[in-house]
Amino acid sequence: MKQIAILSGKGGTGKTTITASFAVLAHNAVIADCDVDAADLHLILDPHVNVKQEFKGSKLAVIDKSKCSECDECERNCRFNAIKDFVVDPVLCEGCGVCVYVCPEKAIRLEEKVSGYAFISETRYGPMAHARLNTAESNSGKLVSLVRQNAKQLAEKGKRDLILIDGPPGIGCPVIASLTGVDLTLIITEPTMSGIHDLQRVLEVAKHFGVTSAVCINMYDINIENTERIAEFCNRNNIETVGKIPFNPIVTEAMVAGKPVVEYSPKSGPSNEIREMWNKVRRGLE
Amino acid sequence: MILSVASGKGGTGKTTVAVGMALSLENVQLLDCDVEEPNVHILLHPEINETRAVNVPVPVVDEKLCDYCGKCSEFCEYNAIVVMPNKVMTFPALCHGCGGCSIICPKSAITEEKREIGLVKKGFAGNIEFACGELKIGEPMADPIIKQVKSEINDKKTVIIDAPPGTSCPVITSVYGSDCCLLVTEPTPFGLHDLKLTIEMLREIKIPFGVIVNRAGIGDRKVYGYCEEEGIPILLEIPFSRRVAELYSRGIPFVNEMPEWKREFLSIFNSVEKQVGK
């Protein structure tokens, strides 16, 4: 079984648009949406949810006021400044349990909280694993791992040989959880100075974890000079540029219609380019 | 006043708005809290005059003192320390630095050392005071760096915070404590969906907000319908234009080339200031 993670560093470069089209073209893939705190792929793939799992990713300190003697030990020992006047700030608390340990009155306990849900679903294009992290929650990396585990099980059960991972932006915890152990990361960038900067950082992360990368330049004609700069950079670093997608309002139109662009407008420039890129990626995986 | 700029969906124009606002005001400090992919410096080219490391404490076990009782690993909520029959392993990248293992160790075998996970850089871009954070490649935890960037807040100035995308931990850490949050969205289904999540988040942590629609004219009208239904003010619309996109692609703040927009940013700022009362 092969796994591809679609990443970008910078947000809004087209990860989800391209993943959705790949889901159409792949035929025999399992789709995994690992952008768990701002998931959008379901808006296009319209999954029917079969299983909903509670995700308990974090804990929260709770003070029993009736036992508290206001000795201040908890406040002094909390490294996250999460206790003030014997009240726990749920935003700042990281659920470490130090306060529970130091409290002489045993007035504090850790409570598990439901910090999101994981879903196992069916789409027109194949099975899908996805999730929803509750807002204002931490531990998205753990939820990403759960989604990937679910995707793997779906692939084994359905004898599917590919997992398509739609990743989150950035380079931190959820990105690392999305790319470890995959066969390829396809990095979607745009020909902007920020796009180039963010591309270089996410490429370094992939390299750090020993994952091969390929690059796609989306909206390449917004700035041809920068596109050339990216292609040159990739060339110098032995990274294949597998696609250059032109800017075209049809891509947004497809999103508004709730359809993958290769299905909405199969003959458009972006669709042609995505198909060609998919063929290269597929061949590269074999 | 502290004004944060957030979005849920990435690439909607947070940095464009944060930089546009900073260039339109006087006596301003701009903090780039998107420490995973900081971009403000690309538009503003600040002169950096101070760089410091951000360190987090991680445990060091003195195995001469350790009797492998395993209490530390039982205590650790993050699985960052594992005790085997005659060996202790630590996983620094998982450690949150709570210090629990060193408090709990009955043999006092655990001390802490500093581990560098990123940088904070400070400087000026013209009159704009600037600070940003930078997460080291391969490091998972952005929060300690964001907190360090925010420790630079200069309360004698108007502070603008450029937040990372998303709705989880790093975003909350960035916007927490601000007087108002500007939510930048685009009028597309993805933009609207992530806007709703971000609004849910801001309501939970009780920060007032207003919406800025970027790339107005693309997509559909549903963002407007939603804001009207919910009584959410749309503070500004920036129409989609190839010129703005091209300027951005070259790393040029569009308000510098189209200075009439500075008035718009100033007027949003004034109305926010009036409402927040600071």
Image (cartoon, rainbow, N blue to C red):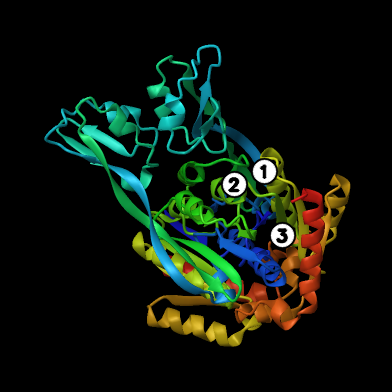
Amino acid type, residue under disc 2 in the picture: Ile
Q: Tell me, yes or no, whether the two marked residues, 1 and 3, touch with CB atoms within 8 Å.
A: no
- Count neighbours of disc 2 (C-alpha within 10 A) and say few if under 14, some if 14 to 19, many if 20 or more: many
Residue at 74% x, 62% y is B186
Q: Can residue A280 be seen in the rendering of this structure? A: no
Q: Mark 1 points at which residue?
A: B201
Q: Tell me, yes or no, whether the two marked residues, 1 and 2, touch with CB atoms within 8 Å.
A: yes
Can you give x and y, in whole percent of width and height, for residue A124 in the image?
Answer: 66, 51
Can you give x and y, in whole percent of width and height, for residue A56 in the image?
Answer: 52, 32
Q: Mark 3 points at which residue?
A: B184
Residue at 69% x, 44% y is B202
As helix, strand or loop, the secondary structure at mark 1 comes to helix
Q: Is residue A130 left or right of residue A42?
A: left
Can you give x and y, in whole percent of width and height, for residue A130 in the image?
Answer: 58, 45
Q: Tag 3, which chain?
A: B
Amino acid type, residue under disc 1 in the picture: Met
Q: In this view, does B24 lie above or below B118?
A: below
Q: Mark 2 points at which residue?
A: B172
Q: Tell me, yes or no, whether the two marked residues, 3 and 2, touch with CB atoms within 8 Å.
A: no
